[in-house]
Amino acid sequence: HVQLVESGGGSVQTGGSLRLSCVASGASTSSAICMGWFRQAPGKEREGVAAINRGGSVNYSDAVKGRFTISQDNAKNTLYLQMSSLKPEDTAIYYCAANYYEYDGLSRFLALGGESWGQGTQVTVSS
């Protein structure tokens, strides 16, 4: 049973940067078919932000493309999300998710979510 633990959230001003981390235990990140980041702002639905598959392909939402970078360090069993040029609309709880059994493309993963989830980390961007 995989466990995912996010960290790295915090409060920054517009234009600032943060790096989120998601450490996996119980299963390695290298064995995940795909992993990704999702976020949910107050009063809004959850949305997929960025995803990466075992082959290294990545996919980003239009809202973060060019500002966020997803990466994976299998030696550290960790998934990262480097966030730059942050905007107030990036304020949300950010969740890490992973699929170890099923895969139907990164777009579908971002649309539907993952099999396993972390508890989330809060990101607040002030203007």
Image: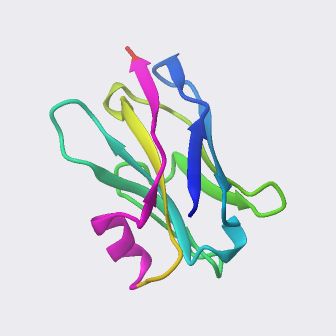
The residue lying at 68 percent from left, 66 percent from top is 29
Horizontal and vertical percent position of residue 116:
46, 61
Which sits in the foreground, 38 or 6? 6
In the image, what residue occupies the spot 71% across and 72% down?
A: 30
Highlighted magenta segment, given as a residue range:
104-125
Reply yes or no: does residue 118 show up in magenta.
Answer: yes
The quarter of the displayed image where residue 60 is located: bottom left
| Side (left or right) of 77 relative to 71 | right
Q: In front: 99, or 68?
A: 99
**Is 63 left, or right, of 5 in this rendering?**
left
Image quadrant occupied by the C terminus: top left
The percent position of residue 59, horizontal first and vertical second, equals 47, 68
Percent from the top left, x then y, of residue 61? Answer: 37, 58
Residue 23 image position (x, y, % from top left): 66, 49
Q: Quadrant of residue 117?
A: bottom left
Q: Is residue 102 among the parts visible in the rendering?
A: yes
Q: Residue furthest front?
A: 1
Looking at the image, which residue is at 61% across and 31% down?
8
Q: What residue occupies the far left of the structure in this picture?
A: 43
Question: Residue at the spot x=43%, y=75% of the render?
Answer: 106
Question: Would residue 87 be counted in the magenta stretch?
Answer: no
74 in relation to 117, above or below? below
Question: Which colour scheme appears in the figure?
Answer: rainbow
> Does residue 83 appear in this view?
no
Q: Tell me the quarter of the image containing the N terminus.
A: bottom right
